[in-house]
Image (cartoon, rainbow, N blue to C red):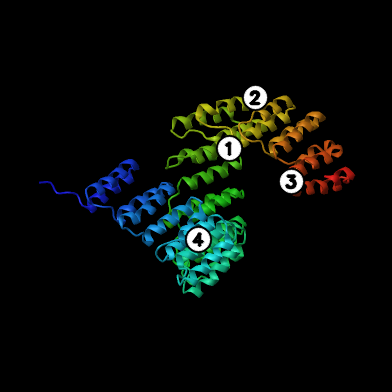
Amino acid sequence: MPVAPDTYTYNTVLMGLCGARQWGDAEELMAEMVRNHCPPNEVTFATQIRAFCQNGLLDRALQLLDRMPGYGCTPDVVIYSTLVNGFSEQGRVDDAIELLNGMLCKPNTVCYNAALKGLCIAQRWEDVGGLIADMVTKDCLPNEATFSMLTSCLCQNGLVDCAMDVLEHMHKYGCRPDVVIYNTLIYSFSEQGRVEDALKLLNSMPCSPDVISFNAALKGLCRAERWDDAEDLIGKMLREDCPLIEMTFNILIDSLCQSGRVNYAIEVFEQMPNFGCTPDIVTYSSLINGLSEQGLVESAIELFRSMPCKPDIFGYNAVLKGLCKAARWEDAGELISKMARKDCPPNEITFNILINSLCQKGLVDRAIEVFEQMPKYGSTPDIFTYNALINGFSEQGRLDDARKILSTMSCKPDAVSYNSALKGLCRAERWKEAEEVVAEMLRKKCPPNEVTFKYANRLFIPNRSAVAKGLCRAARWEEAGELISEMARKDCPPNEVTSIY
């Protein structure tokens, strides 16, 4: 006689159904459990609630939560933390807080951390402080995970000084910052160009820095082109038995190439095997790009062909850049065809490199031919594509073509788009059309900037009051103020009409 399934068996099957997102079958299985006098338990509900939250079905998860008491089940802290985290990640922070405050059991640090994450994502810093105060009041002190999440979110939003304040408060709650927190802070200082602060923090760490710590500081030094200090830092890494890794060399090589020191980058590249490091596709792409930028196209091609790893889109685009700089258009076309054959189809950046280069050389018609080929390769023109074409036509004095591109763009024009067309119109003294372009900028909420005034100075002298009027009607007060300041600087002081607006 077959044995009837028990709750454990049902829950195991339910887990599989939820993993396969077969929600209807999962619901039917719960109904079967009830019919067979094997009612769902907390695990049954927890399994489905977790699956719903992972798939963004938060309202369905809440419905399950509300059904739990009907089956004699009480939601535990794990179920609540899952829900709070789900709402936070979906940006429904107020719902997460409401759920946290209405818990039938005492919330733990995991629950609070989940709600804090949502507040941090929403940049509601005052509420973050209030919730931490609430944690302390409820005798649920923040832990290392709390502070790690806080410092990470603050740094991601450029608030590294606030993150430092958080670091300094950790000891009050019996928490010690780990190397991950320090790495986040060092990286943020480097990204903001505050290299001295990054080095100071690196040298004052109470825990041993790891290779990520050193690499974060190294990146800042390389961006500041402080090559001697970068060399000293690498020496310190070796003295402290912190091995150099591929990322260390990639930071150095890429930074040297970007600053035009390709020969030094090659010397660093040649040293990699001595430290047990193997160049990867990132290394090669940086070098190829550096050689191409310096016009050393043959060297770039030779390195590209000698790569032991499969080239990716970045490597191909780097070679293409060199070919375009040398105006080797046939070779550029062959390279793009090769990319498609090698299962590395060209992307928008590929086409933008070629189109922009052709336009800069005055070959706008050939650029249009390339532009028309983009859909064939599954690429969609972006703002950079259109701006290159508009500027190319404008430079050639083909203003009707420039305006046609501007009016048929598949994406929203930006100030560069309008200014590129405006430049040609003003050079040709086609003032009425130039005025139409400026009027369209205002309608599309793309305000004139310094470049606009540079090209259309004659246009704006009699018409600035009208432009100010448009900005004021749109309640764009700061831009209107800038325009009035510009009027004063250009010997066109605001008059009574301007003051009315």
Point out the tag, 1 or 3, that comes first from the N-terminus.
Answer: 1
Which residue lies under the disc numbered 4?
Answer: 116
C-alpha span from label 2 to label 3: 42 Å
C-alpha distance separating marks 1 and 3 = 47 Å
Question: What quarter of the picture does the C terminus occupy?
Answer: top right
- Amino acid type, label 4: Leu
**In front of the other: label 4 or label 2?**
4
Q: Earlier in the sequence, mark 4 or mark 2?
A: 4
Q: Which residue is mark 1?
A: 322
In the image, is residue 120 above or below residue 493?
below
Task: Look at the numbered disc 4 and give the secondary structure of its residue.
Answer: helix
Distance, label 1 to label 4, CA atoms, is 48 Å
Label 2: which residue? 365
In front: label 1 or label 3: 3
x 84%, y 41%: residue: 465
| Vertical relation: 498 (above or below) 111 | above
